[in-house]
Image (cartoon, rainbow, N blue to C red):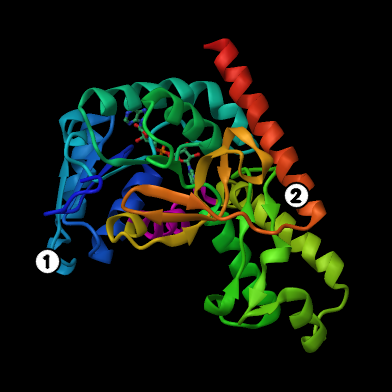
Amino acid sequence: MHNAQWKTRKVVIVGAGAVGSTFAYTLAQSGLADEIVLLDVNQEMVKGQALDLSHGLAYYPNVEISAGDSHDYRDAHVIVITAGAKQQSGQSRLDLLQRNAAIIEDIVDNIVAQGSEGIIVLVSNPVDVLTYLAHLRTSWERGRVIGSGTVLDSARFRYLLSKQCGVDVHNVHAYVLGEHGDSQVAAWSMTHLAGVPINEYCEQCGGCDGWGRLQREIEEAVRRSAYHIIEYKGATNYAVGLALVRIVGAILRNERSVLTVSVPLEGEYGLNNVSMGVPSIVSQNGVESIIEANLSPREEKALIASAKILQESIKEVSRLR
Ligand SMILES: NC(=O)c1ccc[n+]([C@@H]2O[C@H](COP(=O)([O-])OP(=O)(O)OC[C@H]3O[C@@H](n4cnc5c(N)ncnc54)[C@H](O)[C@@H]3O)[C@@H](O)[C@H]2O)c1
């Protein structure tokens, strides 16, 4: 429980579709949770998911998996919300806003009504806008309602850099900031390979022809990743499942890991009234604090532009509701 001794580690997953069920499967294999409870409006489907997942119990580390209901919010340590309509081919994340805002507010009201002391992790898109709305809705202290933010985008960025540079992805340190979406910002100024800033590494390596062009191509590939995968197979689920295990693991194990989760900003980076992906220290309390990186002027400008886009969406949906 929040700030208390935990006997069992209970994770509730709301939405047992492609993302929710893959996350449950990955979390079960990780051994990080003692209890995983799945909730979905589709009662038949969620029972089926819980049964199918439970039939693997002999092969996971010890864990209980079940289908539950809103009473499970009460003693959950982490509640991961993947419920909602998903992005259709060619549809922008912001188009989903209206539909998913109503669903999320309803779920959040239920969580609060159950007296939950857990941490909420939003995943449903548009994740930054929904995280901000959910944060306002709970009136909880900042950091207890967070979004998956650009944790997945940062992994995609690291993957592409690793391929380009021919260096193990674990030695590539790189972050995508801002919106989990079209206005995201690849923070080149924070990018290191084995402690060497990327530009210095490039000079030493000399293996790339036209690094400036390649940088733009990598940024664009990260930004377009979800669109391509959705066109190919209808949903993204594996990498996001792993990104969620990383976030939830940092909470359950009180790791104080630095992750670019989406968190409401209160003056950091000169921004307010918005939630977006920024490097944050993640512990059992959710986000403990935000790290303010020394960005380049171009990156700072892009981050402010990303915040403006999200603030407009927040205003738009607040006006309509
Ligand atoms: N943040 C990220 O990095 C990221 C990555 C991938 C997908 N997503 C988002 O995650 C969400 C889920 O994607 P998906 O592919 O799993 O979709 P999906 O359609 O497969 O699953 C969504 C599930 O939510 C359920 N649901 C709908 N309303 C509900 C409610 N009120 N209560 C409980 N359950 C409800 C549906 O029945 C369905 O099973 C989408 O919004 C998608 O855009 C986010």
Residue 15 locus on image (x, y percent): 33, 37
Q: Residue at x 56, y 79 (%)?
A: 171
- 319 w.r.t. 19: above or below: above
Mark 2 or mark 1, which is nearer to you?
A: 2
Segment tinted magenta in the rendering: 233-248
Q: Secondary structure at mark 1?
A: helix
- 205 w.r.t. 228: above or below: below
Q: Does 67 appear in magenta?
A: no
Can residue 139 be seen by looking at this rendering? yes
Which mark identifies residue 300? Answer: 2
Query: Could you tell me the amino acid type at mark 1?
Result: Ala
Ligand 1 shows up in which quadrant of the image? top left
- The residue tagged 1 is 58
Q: Left or right: 291 with respect to 294?
A: left
Q: Left or right: 145 with respect to 267?
A: left
- Number of residues whose C-alpha sits closer than 10 Å to that of mark 2, classed few (under 14), some (14–19) or many (20 or more): some
Q: Residue at x 70, y 59 (%)?
A: 294
Query: Could you tell me the amino acid type at mark 2?
Result: Glu
Which mark identifies residue 190? Answer: none
